[in-house]
Image (tube, grey):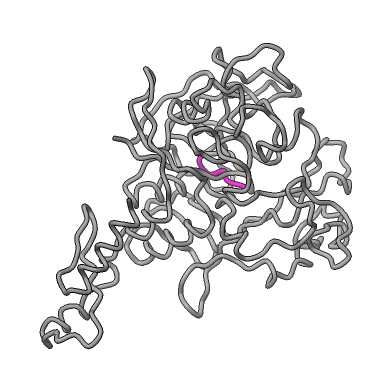
């Protein structure tokens, strides 16, 4: 239907009549050898490019309509996570429109009132995962887990980074990244010999292409990076109830996957149990099968932000676990105090925002949406309905944080 509308609009524009859609500017395409008057040409030429609004994004983001249930009214949800290219399109369309602030020195994007949206410097986690005081080779994560969005000074526009143009050796510089003990030869996708680690979605051991990366989910997205995208196009972030309804696939799926199982063939997930360090990265937003509603990768790939605030209690000192969420609530006007990540500020006066669905480097239980007997893996964060409860602070955003959007009817 959208294609028919767009073609109709183009035809009408060629006839110098123009076409309007709700909430969209008039975009006129002059007909070749047209007998337009000088006045009409001047009027068309003077039209500001800043008036072109959401038509391209609306074509790019595809939605499926769902009926809802006693917990949710009818709504539409995007069939995929928002991709790198879609986020780049947003940044370029909103650039110079007083939507956000781009700090070129920090290479970081903020809301107008100073909340972090995305850190374009984002790179892989280098961590002593088992806290034994030693950085080991098997604890290293894939260098491809970086932010693939950059600002191009020549064009003065944002763009998706081509992996073939990246100097991957920089990620093994111990002065820049203390704790690194691997080398480029340890990563099959980065060296000519195709030796070393690779993820379950990367068995070809080839460097991802630019086209692939354009269609990876945008990552390193903070909560307000997701919300500003949604607000700009008149969308919304899903509620947990909406997300869970979509994830159950109309069949009460136990897991938010294409077939309701936690198999690695139906989701990009790290494994059944926590502890293993995943050697892969995010994958194309349509790379596996869709669920019965036609929605891709609700479980796995990237954690997805939802609207809810989360009241979080951390685990006791020395205890293992993720802490607990005591309640979720929605308040679109609430703003937590900003955190200076390079300063002494703490998170003691901060609430978290809900994340849902798990990611490529997490484990099956994080994708759970329906309570089942003999569920695999830890269950400490499952609520009474079997939905995994999780959250993150609004200034947090790493290689496995992304989002999708909804349209409320």
Quarter of image, res 24: bottom left
Q: Is residue 208 above or below residue 296?
A: below
Residue 327 position, x and y percent, is 48, 20
Left or right, 296 with respect to 142, comes to left
Magenta stretch containing residue 292, yes or no? no
Quadrant placement of the C terminus: top left
Left or right, 297 with respect to 111, comes to right
The magenta stretch is 394-398
What residue is drawn where x is 43% and y is 29%?
242
Residue 172 position, x and y percent, is 81, 61
> Camera-side residue: 67 or 326?
67
> Camera-side residue: 68 or 17?
17
What residue is drawn where x is 76% and y is 57%?
177
| Magenta stretch prevailing secondary structure | loop
Q: Is residue 145 above or below residue 129?
A: below
Quarter of image, res 175: bottom right
Q: Is residue 231 above or below residue 311?
A: below
What residue is drawn where x is 41% and y is 43%?
63
Left or right, 79 with respect to 143, comes to left
Residue 340 position, x and y percent, is 53, 48
């Amino acid at each position: 239907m959208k294609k028919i509308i767009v073609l109709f609009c183009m035809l009408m524009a060629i006839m110098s009549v123009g076409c309007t859609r709700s909430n969209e500017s008039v975009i006129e395409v002059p007909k070749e050898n047209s007998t337009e008057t000088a006045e009409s040409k001047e009027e068309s030429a003077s039209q500001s490019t800043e008036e072109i609004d959401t038509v391209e994004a609306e074509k790019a983001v595809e939605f499926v309509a769902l009926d809802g249930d006693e917990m949710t009214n009818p709504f539409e949800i995007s069939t995929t996570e928002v991709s790198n290219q879609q986020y780049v399109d947003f940044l370029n369309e909103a650039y110079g429109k007083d939507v956000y602030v781009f700090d070129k020195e920090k290479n970081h994007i903020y809301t107008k009132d100073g909340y972090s949206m995305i850190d374009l410097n984002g790179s892989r986690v280098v961590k002593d995962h088992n806290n034994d005081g030693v950085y080991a080779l098997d604890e290293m994560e894939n260098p491809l887990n970086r932010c693939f969005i950059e600002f191009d000074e020549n064009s003065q526009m944002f763009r998706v980074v081509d992996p073939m143009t990246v100097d991957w050796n920089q990620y093994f510089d111990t002065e820049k990244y203390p704790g690194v003990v691997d080398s480029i030869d340890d990563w099959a996708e980065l060296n000519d010999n195709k030796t070393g680690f690779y993820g379950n979605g990367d068995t070809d051991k080839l460097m991802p292409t630019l086209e692939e990366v354009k269609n990876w989910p945008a990552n390193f997205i903070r909560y307000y990076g997701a919300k500003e995208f949604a607000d700009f196009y008149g969308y919304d972030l899903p509620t947990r109830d909406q997300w869970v309804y979509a994830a159950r696939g109309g069949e009460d799926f136990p897991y938010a996957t294409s077939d309701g199982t936690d198999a690695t063939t139906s989701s990009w997930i790290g494994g059944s149990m926590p502890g293993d360090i995943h050697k892969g990265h995010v994958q194309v937003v349509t790379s596996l099968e869709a669920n019965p509603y036609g929605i891709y990768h609700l479980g796995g790939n990237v954690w997805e932000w939802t609207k809810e605030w989360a009241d979080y209690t951390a685990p006791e000192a020395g205890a293992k676990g993720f802490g607990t969420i005591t309640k979720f609530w929605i308040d679109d006007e609430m703003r937590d105090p900003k955190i200076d990540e390079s300063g002494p500020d703490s998170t003691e006066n901060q609430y978290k925002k809900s994340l849902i669905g798990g990611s490529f480097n997490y484990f099956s239980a994080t994708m759970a949406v329906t309570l089942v007997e003999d569920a695999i893996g830890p269950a400490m964060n499952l609520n009474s309905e079997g939905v995994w409860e999780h959250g993150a602070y609004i200034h947090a955003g790493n290689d496995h944080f992304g989002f999708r959007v909804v349209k409320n009817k």
